Image (cartoon, rainbow, N blue to C red):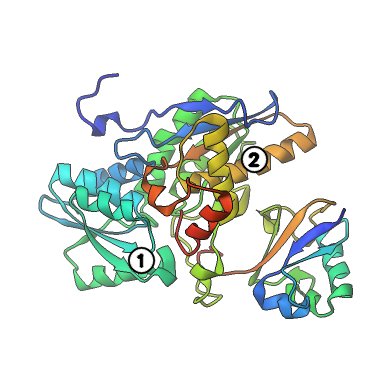
């Protein structure tokens, strides 16, 4: 396939079957390989759409500074597009994300402000909002509330999946900004009213959540619960185990959040088998494992890897 | 076989420190009633006015029971039920 530039090659990622992890010929799993995007993650779609939209609206002009709270992938995508388009990029990122993410961000020229580990991504959002007030000339694209994020998936990811898998019964993705689930979910429902939209959210240990209050939950502005059919909460050990299974059984080297998504996909697959129903379950491989090698997730026994992952954000 | 119920730290004073206990029942509601018999007080920490408490999340095999049928969600032997306090990052 030939493209005029790297950005033109965005999307149109492969959907691959999982012959070994699918429970039966009637209940099949399909992986959407979003690591095959320009910077290696699904976030390239949202980043490109958000920048295009801001340019169209005249909010972004050459020389502008873009500010974004990110646990890594969105920042990396934005930094790449920003570099090509001549913008300065400032990221706010939790300090307990993997070392590779920082290296990649700097490689594409982004500046990084670290937010305290305790608050995770929510704290990064708070810090970024504060910085935006201090620098009114900076442009915060704000992936959690930017409709162009969900629209990227409504216009690209959703149609790609439906074209490749017209018989789709379930769509499973990670719940972060909620952009993927909202965009793909709305598109699929318009064309397959009975489709199940399944969210997988990370469940971190007390090392990450221990210092927080119970009622300070953050709801992304994009989130509309009515789009979802159900939600899974995936503990770190399950995400890690599934990441290894995907590698061992299907040869797919995915990031740890994908293990969480696969856990939910296998959960709905097991329910379909139990109910004697046919199912074609598409799930998102948000990125590959490269950025997480330093976490030790792929080395030694599962128990050792779990221990190393304690206290780290993996989605 | 029974249903394994995983107990969060803040409720372990009611289970003698146990991280996981076994229970029985055909629905989540019955399971909680059964748990309360063995671990008095746990029921009211989970249920209020016939509904799951707002700041308690309950998962059946990691799936949020609020999407499944709440207290009426059917449960069966071999299932795992996880009780967690709602925390930041949860999006309710």
B22 or A181, which lies in front?
B22
Residue that badge 1 annotates = A124
Residue that badge 2 annotates = A266
Chain for mark 1? A
Instruction: State the image coordinates of residue A64 (x, y, percent, origin top left).
Output: 14, 55
- Mark 1 packing: few (<14 Cα in 10 Å), some, or many (20+)? many
What element does badge 2 sit on?
Answer: helix
Against A181, residue B10 (above or below) is below
Q: Of callouts 2 and 1, which one flags the residue occurring earlier in the amino acid sequence? A: 1
Picture quadrant of residue A140: bottom left
Chain for mark 2? A
Mark 2 in CB contact with mark 1 (< 8 angstroms): no
Instruction: State the image coordinates of residue A58 (x, y, percent, origin top left).
Output: 18, 50
Residue at horizontal 28 percent and vertical 42 percent from the top: A48
Instruction: State the image coordinates of residue B66 (x, y, percent, origin top left).
Output: 69, 58
Q: Visible in this render: residue A260?
A: no
Q: Visible in this render: residue B60?
A: yes
Q: Looking at this rendering, what residue extends furthest in the left direction?
A: A63
Asked if marks 2 and 1 fall on the same chain, the answer is: yes
Q: Left or right: B32 with respect to A150?
A: right
Residue A49: numbered disc:
none
Residue at horizontal 34 percent and vertical 40 percent from the top: A45
Residue at horizontal 27 percent and vertical 46 percent from the top: A53
């Amino acid at each position: 396939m030939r493209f005029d530039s790297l950005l033109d090659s965005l999307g149109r990622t492969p959907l691959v079957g999982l012959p070994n992890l699918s429970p039966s010929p009637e209940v099949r799993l399909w992986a959407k390989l979003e690591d095959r995007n320009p910077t290696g993650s699904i976030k390239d779609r949202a980043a490109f759409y958000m920048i295009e939209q801001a340019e169209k609206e005249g909010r972004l002009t050459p020389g502008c500074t873009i500010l974004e709270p990110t646990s890594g992938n969105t920042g990396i995508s934005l930094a790449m597009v920003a570099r090509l388009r001549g913008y300065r990029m400032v990221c706010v990122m939790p300090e307990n994300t993997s070392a590779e993410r920082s290296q990649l961000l700097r490689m594409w020229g982004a500046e990084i402000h670290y937010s305290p580990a305790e608050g995770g991504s929510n704290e990064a959002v708070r810090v970024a909002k504060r910085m935006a007030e201090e620098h009114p000339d900076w442009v915060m694209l704000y992936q959690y509330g930017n409709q162009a994020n969900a629209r990227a998936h409504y216009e690209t990811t959703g149609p790609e999946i439906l074209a490749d898998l017209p018989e789709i019964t379930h769509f499973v993705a990670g719940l972060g900004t909620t952009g993927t689930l909202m965009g793909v979910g709305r598109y699929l429902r318009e064309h397959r009213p009975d489709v199940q939209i399944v969210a997988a959210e990370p469940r971190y240990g007390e090392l990450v959540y221990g210092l927080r209050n119970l009622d300070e939950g953050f709801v992304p502005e994009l989130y509309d619960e009515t789009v979802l059919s159900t939600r899974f909460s995936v503990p770190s050990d399950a995400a890690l185990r599934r990441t290894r299974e995907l590698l061992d059984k299907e040869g797919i080297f995915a990031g740890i959040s994908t293990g969480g998504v696969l856990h939910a996909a296998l959960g709905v697959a097991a329910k379909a088998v139990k109910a004697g129903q046919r199912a074609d379950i598409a799930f998102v491989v948000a990125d590959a494992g490269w950025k997480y090698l330093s976490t030790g997730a792929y080395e030694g026994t599962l128990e050792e890897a779990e221990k190393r992952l304690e206290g780290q954000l993996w989605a | 076989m029974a249903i394994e119920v995983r107990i969060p730290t803040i409720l372990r004073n009611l289970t003698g420190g146990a991280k996981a206990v076994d229970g029985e029942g055909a629905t989540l509601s019955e399971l909680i009633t059964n748990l309360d018999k063995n671990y008095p007080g746990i029921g009211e920490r989970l249920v209020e006015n016939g509904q799951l408490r707002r700041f308690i999340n309950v998962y059946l095999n990691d799936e949020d029971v609020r999407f499944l049928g709440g207290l009426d969600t059917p449960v069966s032997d071999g299932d795992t039920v996880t009780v967690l306090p709602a925390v930041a990052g949860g999006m309710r």
